[in-house]
Image: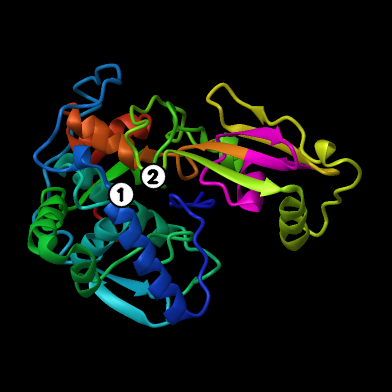
Amino acid sequence: MLKMDVRRGEPWSRRAAMTGAGLLLLLFLALWALVPESAREPEEEPPAATLPALGESAGSAAPAVDGWDESRSIRLLRGDGTVEELTLEDYLWGVTAAEMPAAFRSEALKAQAVAARTFCLYRQAHPVDRHPEVPICDDSSCCQAYLSPQETAVIWGDETQRYSDKLTQAVAETDGLVCLYGGEPINAVFFSSTAGKTADAVTVWGTDVPYLTSVDSPEGEEVPGWNTVVTFTDDELRQQVTTLRADIKLSGDPETWLGEPEADDTGMVLRLTVGDTELTGREARALFGLRSARFTVEREEGSFSFHVLGYGHAVGMSQYGANALAGQGKGFAEILSWYYTGITVGSYEAL
């Protein structure tokens, strides 16, 4: 989800509208099947990793404001180019359904609902060039993903009623609550999972944001797809670079094509030399189709292997981390205050 370049997790591309919608649905179904039993209700034993205790002030939240979401509307640009007008309540239900597995613990779902509400308000005040006339779209690489009740019914099957009720509760019990910094809604970006720590916004996007700083995050090997390997033969790597970055020149012995990744103390790659060009970790991630910019490179005979940890840009709230914290007994306000440094959780009048 700054948005400088958000989302989670990112980056999903669209082809034609109908094709893109079908692929998104298939991908969501595939990922849903991977959700571990440890993420499901009733809550299992929390993971071994723990975080320092959060102070009471950091974990406090104003009470929900009944009817706030229902009384406000939002215009949503869909992938097929149409614009829907929804109540904020219905929109947040669909975002939470699309962005976080409904099998996650209730406090994690509430944290996601607040983050989604906050991002919606932030985007109202900070429109993007891609759709300046409509405040928000359903493309997760730009704004936030969204699924209608009809789409979720296909995905959830026999669990539809239970999951639907969980999301309705998550939205209702956080009605009108947003993450505030200096009295204004924050750019509440989020992503899937990380390796030990989140990243500073300045590391990933080059912009220092006081509430988007690196913090510990407890998820790990229990996350589906947390540790992945992407391998290119020499010919495949040359083709990948030539196709996506024709300005980069690869010459000489393939052994020299990739430099040693330069990473920060969290393992986030800052720079990687590819051929005659130095790329940021974010650019390298996009070029090679990696799940995150936390990677190492291993040279084997005739190939390069990228060993990747986590999924997403690693800035803001980790969704699997939020679920792990919920398993430790943390409430949604504690979770949000952990991942968004120095914020408060309260109501906000404008929309």
Query: In the rendered image, which residue does mark 1 sit on?
Result: 34
Q: Quadrant of residue 42?
A: top left
Against 40, is 328 above or below?
Answer: above
> Could you tell me the amino acid type at mark 1?
Leu
Q: Nearer the viewer, mark 1 or mark 2?
A: 1
Of callouts 1 and 2, the N-terminal one: 1
Residue 156 picture location, percent across and down: 19, 63
User: Is residue 130 in view from this perspective?
Assistant: yes
Which stretch appears magenta?
278-305
> Could you tell me the amino acid type at mark 2?
Ser
Camera-side residue of 58 and 263: 263
Q: Which part of the image, by quadrant, shows the C terminus?
A: bottom left
Camera-side residue of 316 and 308: 308
Question: Which residue shows up at 53% across the image and 25% down it?
Answer: 266
Query: In the rendered image, which residue does mark 2 sit on?
Result: 192
Position of 301 with respect to 115 (left or right) is right
Neighbours of disc 1 within 10 Å: few (<14), some (14-19), many (20+)? few
Question: Which residue shows up at 38% across the image and 44% down it?
Answer: 192
Against 124, is 258 above or below?
Answer: above
Residue 131 picture location, percent across and down: 49, 71
